[in-house]
DNA sequence: AGGATAAAGTTCGAGGTGCGAACAAATTCG
DNA sequence: CGAATTTGTTCGCACCTCGAACTTTATCCT
């Protein structure tokens, strides 16, 4: 049971009823399509007449469309309803330190087109170029309407103003991306932290069992981010900064982290950690410790490639990273007990090696009553980008803001 | 934005509108009482006529009552509305390993009476005795109606059946407390884990700034429990077992925990930990390590008493506990970034000593963007017991289950 | 004293919404 | 060809909020 937020509520009117039931209908169609009005009546518990009325309106508003007629052993054949995927489009933007990916998607989270550009160091320049690219992309893929622009980025937004307040890897500061883009393009813009976007992606378009309402996404790159869905809703915390489990101290005497502390989880288990482990093993092998110039700092991708070739040093570095990754995941499983925990990042390419080590660490360390499934995401599925789409679609498919 | 739970939703009808607005009104009265209809109109945004209609019904249902007339510089004087605290009572039961406390409370979370009994080892016997005590207490404090019985206990319930599935300190197993009590007394029973109950207590009757929607309660006794409120709602996780941060590994080579792992947070920072630190310091002082018989295992309460007398050994043990407590709290602050984190337990009696050490650890270890206030609870305020009341009152004051 | 002003609270018809029964349409089976 | 069955529509009813008009109560100013 939720407490009513007296600082941010909506009273109910007659139309509220229709809004609630429409959203339920829309979700039922999304889940069961193709589906007849009679089926919707059974799924929802609404009266046949009510279902017909709502369907009529949703068809008029072009959210739904009628399709083929079904087949039954007896009686009148049902007319199927579908989501009208042509109705609207959504623009998704995934900003990463080096590359920014943008895409347009239809209502069913299918990408219609996708392209990349470099992420500029100068925010002004970047916004101008991104705006142009988005407009071009929308012009090339005309839709009945565009609903909005979702943006994922490695940083933190102020929860009220949505201004960017922290994005060390991008090198921007205090940027009001939202307002600028909204003015340039004329569509609502929604920003979200990358890990949170991944969590949303899994919630709305993940291939999980139906009814997953507690889900954690762990993004592993040069840092570690955690996005949490609890009770079917993204957890942003008081200032929008929840999920910084990457900066939980795991080894007080461990290596220095760029956050200023030492031995943070992300210092021990991120891609950069594997890179460091690999480099360290080089100098150890040579019998010299600390002669930094000797350390061969291979990019993480190369380490993964070496692992595929069964290179012993690379495997050892990866194992070390995996063990620490598992330790942190055990913390999340123990403390949050989600139904599903998904891992996002290049490291999933070696999941056949990493997965068992993580599973072992979790089994060893975590409290036994949780039954969290730990799953790698397919990098092809572009979780960040899918999350930006979910971010916008939420507004139509999510629960109405009431009470 | 919340995702609609298609496995557990309610469609809206005309009455839903009234239900939503009634609950909003009830909460507004709770927050602002005494308050006039005209004020409620302004707070809620509803029409004057609607406010009057809802008030009329709530008065008829005895949720509200009219009180004194107010005073204004001009115009007709307003009639104030209050919560009708006499309307209903709630029974709260706080089961702890040695003692069970039971109380009856009015709608405003004020205790009318409170008494204790010993917690039996035999569950059947216990249920019988508890039922009798509850019935006696209700008879001694007659109310218009009793709304339900809330129970807090140190253990875990199955989230669907509410059967007790894990309560090592009580020594009961697989107990269906809910059904038995409901049959004996004829009131709905709600069970909740003690840490969760404390979190609910702070959410509903805590003395915090208004609008705290992300809150963590840490209960420190012989174990450590964590209750989480995120987005204004209790986080129970997939199987109702979320919050076991007490069993997150902090020192892999640390002392054995009764959960089977080693170096869990609760092994390092619970009351028992302080007791152990104290005992260890004894044997160290004597120059012998490991001769267990020499270790003086003082109860935690005695250690606190010694601390009040500035006993050096006791202070050292408490400091050690406090440092570890702070380390774990830093993890929660970093990862969950709640508005408020409350600490519950005997340790708060020495908060003038413990608080600064915790604050220091949090400052040192946690990510800097969170602005969590860390507060001790007053043991006199009986957070567990208040939580059981909140557990029941939620059903009337919480957001309606819709969509 | 009496009228203007002001604010609280009530009354009542209009419009939106779901309910539920009756009805129409479409299809199969004997 | 009619009975049975299932889908989908129509229509009057009840519930709810809205919003304007109205009543009630009180103060201030002339």
Image (spheres, coloured by chain):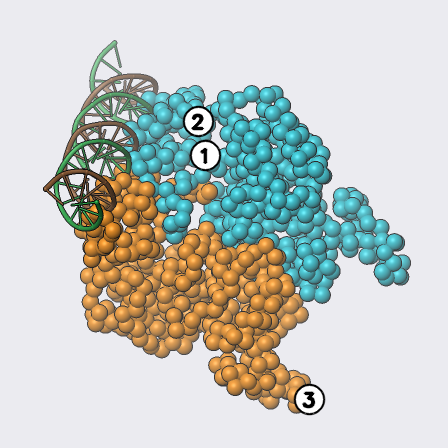
Chain colours: A orange, B cyan, C green, D brown
Q: Which residue is mark 2?
A: B63
User: In the rendered structure, which disc, 1 or 2, sits on the residue that comes first in sequence?
Assistant: 2
Give the foreground label among 1 and 2: 1
Do the residues at pointers 2 and 3 share their chain?
Answer: no
> Please, what secondary structure does the residue beneath circle 1 have?
helix
- Left-right relation of A303 to A138: right
The front one of A391 and B306 is A391
Using the image, determine if residue A81 lies above or below residue B77: below
Q: Residue at x 25, y 56 (%)?
A: A82
Residue A250, visible in the rendered structure: yes
Chain letter of the residue beneath label 2 in the structure image:
B
Q: Residue at x 42, y 64 (%)?
A: A198
Cβ atoms at labels 1 and 2 below 8 Å apart? yes
Q: Which residue is mark 1?
A: B396
The front one of B212 and A60 is A60
> Please, what secondary structure does the residue beneath circle 3 have?
loop
Q: Which residue is mark 3?
A: A287
Using the image, determine if residue A332 lies above or below residue B149: below
Q: Residue A43, image x and y in percent?
A: 33, 47
Q: Residue at x 35, y 60 (%)?
A: A390
Quadrant position of residue A180:
bottom left
Q: Residue at x 60, y 89 (%)?
A: A294
Q: CA distance from mark 2 to mark 3?
A: 79 Å
């Amino acid at each position: 049971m939720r407490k009513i937020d007296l600082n941010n509520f909506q009273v109910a009117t007659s139309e509220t009823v229709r809004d609630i039931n429409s959203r339920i209908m829309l979700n039922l169609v999304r889940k069961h399509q193709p589906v007849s009005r009679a089926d919707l009546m059974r799924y929802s518990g609404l009266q046949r007449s009510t279902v017909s009325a709502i369907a009529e309106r949703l068809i008029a508003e072009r959210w739904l469309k009628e399709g083929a007629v079904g087949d039954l052993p007896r009686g009148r054949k049902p007319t199927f309803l579908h989501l009208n995927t042509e109705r609207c489009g959504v623009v998704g933007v995934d900003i990463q330190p080096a590359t920014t990916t943008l895409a347009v998607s239809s209502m069913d989270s299918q990408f219609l087109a996708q392209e990349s550009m470099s992420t500029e160091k100068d925010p002004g320049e970047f916004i101008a170029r991104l705006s142009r690219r988005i407009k071009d992309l929308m012009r090339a893929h005309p839709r009945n309407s565009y609903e909005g622009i979702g943006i994922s980025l490695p940083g933190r937004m102020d929860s009220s103003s949505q201004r960017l307040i922290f994005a060390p890897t991008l090198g921007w500061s205090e940027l009001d991306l939202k307002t600028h883009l909204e003015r340039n393009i004329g569509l609502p813009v929604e920003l979200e932290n990358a890990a949170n976007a991944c969590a949303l992606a899994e919630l709305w378009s993940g291939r999980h069992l139906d009814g997953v309402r507690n889900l954690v996404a762990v993004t592993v790159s040069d840092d570690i981010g955690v996005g949490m869905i609890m009770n079917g809703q993204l957890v942003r915390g008081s200032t929008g900064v929840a999920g910084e489990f990457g900066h939980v101290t795991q080894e007080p005497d461990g290596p220095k982290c760029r956050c200023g502390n030492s031995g943070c989880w992300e210092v021990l288990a991120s891609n950069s950690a594997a890179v460091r482990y690999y480099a360290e093993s080089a100098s150890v092998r040579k019998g010299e410790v600390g002669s930094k110039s000797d350390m061969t700092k291979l990019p993480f991708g190369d380490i993964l490639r070496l692992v595929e070739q069964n290179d012993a040093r690379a495997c050892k570095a990866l194992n070390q990273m995996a063990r620490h990754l598992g330790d942190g995941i055990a913390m999340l499983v123990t403390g949050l007990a989600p139904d599903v925990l998904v891992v996002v990042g290049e490291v999933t390419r070696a999941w056949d090696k990493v997965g068992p080590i993580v599973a072992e660490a979790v089994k060893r360390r975590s409290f036994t009553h949780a039954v969290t499934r730990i799953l790698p995401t397919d990098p092809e599925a572009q979780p960040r980008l899918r999350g930006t789409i979910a971010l916008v679609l939420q507004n139509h498919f999510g629960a109405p803001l009431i009470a």
